[in-house]
Image (spheres, coloured by chain):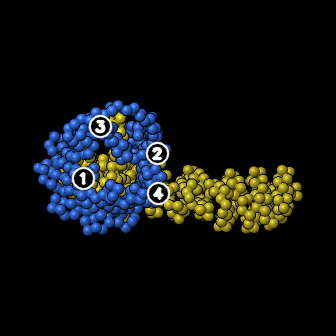
Chain colours: A yellow, B blue
Amino acid sequence: MKNKKLTAFIFMVTALFLTSSVYANEVSAVWERLYNKAQSLSQKYNIMVNIVEQHDRDMIPVLEKALDEQVSAMENQRTITDQLKSDSFTKLVVKELGRLKDREAAPLIWDVVDNSDDPFVKGEAIIALGRVGAKDYSNKLNLMLRNINMNYGNIQDQRKNEIVAYALVMALEKLKSPDSYSPLFFAANGWYSRKSGVKEKASKALLTIVDDPADQLIGIIKDSKDFGLKLAGLEAGVISRASEENKARLAVTALDQGLINSPQSVVQKQQLKSLRVRALEVLEENGAKPESATPLMKSMLIKYQTERLVDEDEMVQLFETAGTYHSDAVGTILSEFLAYLTDRKESGGTVSFRISKSVVIAMGNNGSKVCFEELTRAQYSDSWENSIKREAKNAVQKLNK
Amino acid sequence: MKRIYPAVLVAAFLIAGCATAPVVKDSGEVKKVEPVAEVKKEPVKVVTTVYYPVKETSLYADGSVDEYTVYTYDEKGEKLLKKELFDSDNVLQEREEYEYTGDLPMVKKFFDKNGDLQNYHTYKYDGAGNIVADTTYNSKDEVQSQSKYSWDGNKKVKWSVFDASGALFGTTEYIYEGDLNTKIVNKNSAGEEEEFFVIEYNESGLPVKNTEFSADSTVRGSRTFEYKDGLLVLEKVLRSNGSVKRKIVYSNDEAGNPLEIIYTDSADNVQERIKKEYKSRKVVSYVTE
């Protein structure tokens, strides 16, 4: 009994380490020979199941040969039953070549991608290309995903396209080509159903495919016609591993896009506002304070003064962001805006209390001496409410520290 | 505390007990043996540590995970019950399940990621617990192929493969010198030699080279094995001209378990890294010296 127990244990251990065992050689030779003798597809499939179970690199030649035969036979007319058998067989072989990371099999695997009409076979082959590290094929895969992202095909093909798209995302995630960032980004924000998992998988891939996707995202934010995608580009940058400086660059680009584009609908107006607010939030939270944001902030203030194109929420966010900038340039545009408000107040015009309070607090936080004159004026102006005067006094005290 | 390898276990169990017998002189005279007081030796308690793999992770050259396999055992860590293959997103891809009768695995089932049975093996054993038959079935319980094994004691001497109809595909014969398997011959169904393998060993009885020959004794390729402190550290797969086709580098822990296995191509580009994790259990036995 004890002997049996021991044998069982040895059997298990041997099975577990079979792939690296010296005795795999005669095993692979036997299965390879048996495969070569098999006539029918059913026989070949039965033997291939045993070959795949070995999970042994010594089996690669027979796997490649089997796939080569399959590719050659793809154009032949067959019955549906034969086609199903053939597809199962191809998937079995392609998957194993992928698991074995057989880079030399990439051209054969690509032939399957190119010639198969079945989305599951095509998908399995695409995944295998990723697993074998077929970087030479990443551009072809990028193009495939880009075309599916555009969704120009028949609506009845959408499910098939989702299967292929998911496989493409998996492969491109493994190949890690920087050029794949754009098609993956549009897949993450594309037409795909939630059930397909494409968007979720692509979003995850974006985080790992390149360390710093700032350049790709700046292109997307600038070139995309869809304002929602511009915001998605900014969000992708925020959660990426991009440097603080590059995240700030992205925010400046997004803020610029939010200002230079004109909305054609209520939806677009809201999208552009969201883009501006989010860009300002990023600049507020970010340690890098690019000077290139200053003229954009000034542009927002002018738009508010002239056309009220910027609403109160955005203005409050603008001042919260400006307060984190400690430059004279930002201090100057804040002072100019407070001067505009004080002039308006003193001339009997209405001004937003919330905006007025925000700009005064921002000037104190900015800390530039250029703010001193307008803050002092507000502090002693009879037109301002006492609460604004108190905030102005506090801000002046901050400047004096 | 001792650590134990399977080979040592085999050796230990191969040691047979001694029987007493009267001493017979060459002349045929039987010498009367005077009764003496028997000295009984107390059995010595030996605690050994048995390691078993619990996780195997396949990684790309850059260290990112491709897939991993989790091994599940019974409470004592003696019987492998389940192997589950997960992708890098922790999604189950395949599952193997083992069913036992007593201590021997009798059935191994393969399931796909949807939990659908793909195929299964049934195993038969001889009285010593050696496997004598391994039959593969598809999910419709139809035989796909069968392997039969013959043993001489604990030495496997023959492996025969049959197709679904029961027709012989081919046989493999294992030839020994002493306890060492030095030659393996593959034959077709007509009994003609197809290829053979010659295995060379070092003085410690560890295989150092396995050369594959065609039936006309032409070298097809070979595999060499290098050891450090008795543990395999490098395996080279060589082409027939002796050039390296690929290498397999092993890093072992203090107990001799391979912790990392790196597969490289001929240019030393890493194709795959395998990382293994183990658990251990104590086995107590008593040995009478």
Locate residue B22: give its quadrant. top left
Q: Identify the mark nearer the N-term, 2 or 1.
A: 2
Position of residue A111 measured from the top left corner of the image (x, y, whole percent): 28, 59
Give the residue number, with chain letter if any, for mark 3: B129
Residue depicted at x 27% and y 61%: B222
A288 to the left or right of A1: right
Label 3 neighbourhood size at 10 Å, few (<14), some (14-19), many (20+)? many
Look at discs 4 and 3 and give the one toward the viewer: 3
Position of residue A225 measured from the top left corner of the image (x, y, whole percent): 50, 59
Q: Identify the mark nearer the N-term, 3 or 1.
A: 3
| Mark 3 → mark 2, Cα distance in angstroms | 26 Å
Position of residue A199 measured from the top left corner of the image (x, y, whole percent): 46, 49
Q: Identify whether B203 is placed above or below B83.
A: below
Please check whether the numbered discs 4 and 2 fall on a single chain: yes
Q: Amino acid at mark 4?
A: Gly
Compare residues A270 and A100 and report the one nearer the observer: A100
Q: Identify the mark nearer the N-term, 4 or 3.
A: 4
Label 2 neighbourhood size at 10 Å, few (<14), some (14-19), many (20+)? few
Give the residue number, with chain letter if any, for mark 2: B2
Secondary structure of the residue carrying tag 4 is loop
Mark 2 and mark 4 in contact (Cβ < 8 Å)?
no
Give the residue number, with chain letter if any, for mark 1: B177
